[in-house]
């Protein structure tokens, strides 16, 4: 009897995981096909903030180059405080 309950629980788990994978695949397919649902439009929006590069200096400090809109920030991220080292304006070619 225990073997039958174990098998039933295992098959139910496989079924639920299969349903989750089908839903994620459907969402990805709708995103690629450009469905007119507002949820998918939010997924396609370009973010304003992006990490261009990061370099680990030591165990506590990291140097990161971050782009936001038309500016690049060089930021020193530490364990106790963060420090903006440099701000560079980016010129866009028209």
Image (cartoon, rainbow, N blue to C red):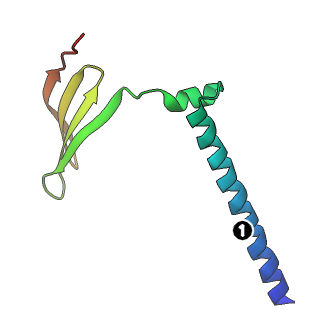
Quarter placement of the C terminus: top left
In the rendered image, residue 63, in percent from the top left (x then y), is placed at: 17, 44
Residue 30 image point, x, y percent: 63, 36
Choose between 29 and 83: the one closer to the eye: 29
Q: Position of residue 73 (x, y in %)?
A: 19, 29
Residue receiving disc 1: 14
Residue pictured at 61% horizontal, 30% vertical: 39
In the rendered view, tell whether residue 92 sits above or below residue 35: above
The answer to whether 33 is drawn above or below residue 38 in the figure is below
Q: Nearer the viewer, residue 7 or 63?
A: 7
Q: Is residue 59 above or below residue 3?
A: above
Judged left or right of residue 32, residue 73 is: left
Residue 54, by quadrant, is top left
Residue 64 as seen in the image, left or right of residue 3? left
Residue at 56% across, 26% down: 41
- Residue at x-position 18% and y-position 16%: 91
Residue 66 x %, y %: 24, 33
For the N terminus, give its image quadrant. Answer: bottom right
Q: Secondary structure at mark 1?
A: helix
Q: Residue at x 82, y 76 (%)?
A: 8
């Amino acid at each position: 009897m225990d073997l039958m309950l174990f098998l039933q629980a295992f098959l139910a788990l496989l079924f639920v995981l299969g349903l989750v994978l089908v839903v994620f695949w459907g969402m990805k397919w709708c995103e690629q096909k450009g469905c007119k649902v507002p949820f998918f439009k939010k997924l396609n929006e370009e973010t304003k903030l992006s990490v261009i590069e990061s370099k680990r200096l030591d165990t506590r400090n990291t140097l990161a180059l971050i782009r936001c809109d038309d500016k690049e920030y060089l930021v020193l991220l530490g364990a106790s405080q963060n420090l903006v080292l440099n701000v560079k304006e980016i010129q866009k070619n028209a």
